[in-house]
Image (tube, helix red, strand yellow):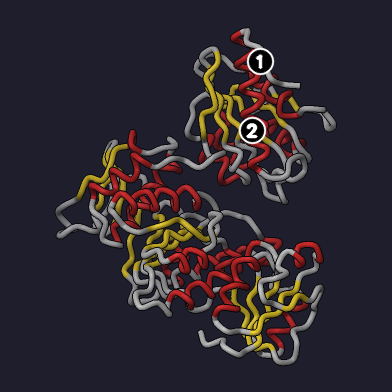
Amino acid sequence: MDVAGRHVLVAGAGVTGKSVVPVLVDLGARVTVTDGNAERLAELDGLGAELVPGLTEPPDDVALVVTSPGWRPTSPLLVAAAEAGIEVIGDVELAWRVGQLREHPPSWLVVTGTNGKTTTAGMLESILKAAGANAVACGNIGYAALDAVRAGYDVLAVELSSFQLHWSSTLAPDAAVVLNLAEDHIDWHGSMAEYAAAKGRVYARAKVAVHNADDDWSARIAAEHAPDSARRIGFQLDTPRAGELGLVEDLLVDRAFVADPATSAEELATLADVRPAGPHNVSNALAAAALARAHGVSPEAVLKGLREYQPAPHRAVEVAEIGGVRYVNDSKATNPHAAAGSLRAHQSIVWIAGGQLKGASVDELVGSIAGRLRGVVLLGVDSPVIAAAVARHAPDVPVNSLRPGDDEPMTAAVSAASAMARPGDVVLLAPAAASLDMFRNYGERGDAFAAAVHALRDDAAGEPSDRT
């Protein structure tokens, strides 16, 4: 990681640029930053870097390019760098290399997959802290891995996207997991095979390769990408085999990190200790436990950490119960695979869905949960696609498709769902789609749902509402 006196080009002036530039300057590099957005680029003024808008080729003397993970490999600047033989890395790879400069490099426990990454990383952080470790969740979770390394944490619970992994070439985690894989980001990677290969990079130099035995892609990626030297650990929502973590009735148990996996097991927690509820989150808890156990954490700390874990916003959070109906916000379910896990956690559902499907199919999802649906409320640009799937697989389930242009679509959606629901039902926002057709992000969509539910609760109680 000797960049002193060398010219480093940073591609992207957003969150990644703000994190990367000060580190490179401190290491003695001569830094240039480029971005197509001049206003965003100007925000880096004063950090010691030269700011050049809109570069499509690297300057002649550039020795390294550090790119934002959002930049596609087909971007002209990155293509030109590769053709010139210039190494291109991401901020995560930079964080790894900078960490190796420390006298005691931090331990990396890495989580990736299509869905469940943030929940698993959060559970892992909670378990590590319960064990007394100087640990933090970082990476794609919102706190940059590079900042965590520079802050001096000893153990990193790192959430990584496929974009970040694509630009990571020497990352060697102590333990890593691919939770699952479903069709997503194909427009960025070009194919499902390339998407899987990017995820597989997490295993390439891992000491312990944890995989989901219930997910064919996870098992396959571990088999194809983990080195022969890696210890392989599976987890599943059933009785674990030797070398796995799993379920025995309502107990989460470990038959991998025990003295004799063939004849013994350690109890880690119960289903009641896992929040949010639902099979997909039990799977996430097993993955987090496996990574923590690979780091040497005790069963007692696993239990304490799972009990103390606070779910992140917009991830299967119960907003209120009104008239015997529970209202649950899972706005983070931004694709069909994520929505499936959320829907399977409940028996009788009025489902609020819709948004931008980005070409993803919902037929398998709707077919698998048709028997759980009391009703469906749809909003967003691709609601006709979901409505057609419901008509095919659940023709007797009532569907209310909100009209485009409604002034308060989420308020209308919650009102319509409330009219369909009966005591004992769950009104579930699990959109199965992205939010950008109607909201700034999934967080704003979830906030709109919560506000609409709170207003409904106030109306039901006869209390004055603060709505304007």
User: Along the line of sight, which residue is nearer the eye, 290 or 457?
Assistant: 457
Residue at point 55% right, 58% down? 140
| x then y, percent, for residue 224 | 45, 71
Q: Is residue 65 left or right of residue 236?
A: right
Disc 2 and disc 1: Cα gap in Å? 23 Å
Work out which quarter of the rendered image holds the C terminus and state it: top right
User: Along the line of sight, which residue is nearer the eye, 320 or 372?
Assistant: 320
Image mark for residue 41: none
Kindly state the secondary structure of the residue where label 1 is placed.
helix
In this view, the residue farthest toward the right is 405
- At label 1, which amino acid type do we have? Ala
Q: Which residue is mark 2?
A: 393
User: Along the line of sight, which residue is nearer the eye, 176 or 101?
Assistant: 101
Q: Quadrant of residue 56?
A: bottom right
| x then y, percent, for residue 325 | 54, 18
When the figure is inspected, residue 268 is found, relative to residue 64, above or below; the finding is above
Kindly state the secondary structure of the residue where label 2 is placed.
helix
Earlier along the polypeptide chain: callout 2 or callout 1? 2
Image mark for residue 419: 1
Residue at point 69% right, 27% down? 377
| x then y, percent, for residue 162 | 57, 63
- Asked if one can make out residue 193 in the rendered structure from this viewpoint, the answer is no
- At label 2, which amino acid type do we have? His
| x then y, percent, for residue 414 | 67, 23
Q: Residues within 10 Å of mark 2 (few under 14, many from 20)?
A: some
Q: Is residue 212 left or right of residue 89?
A: left
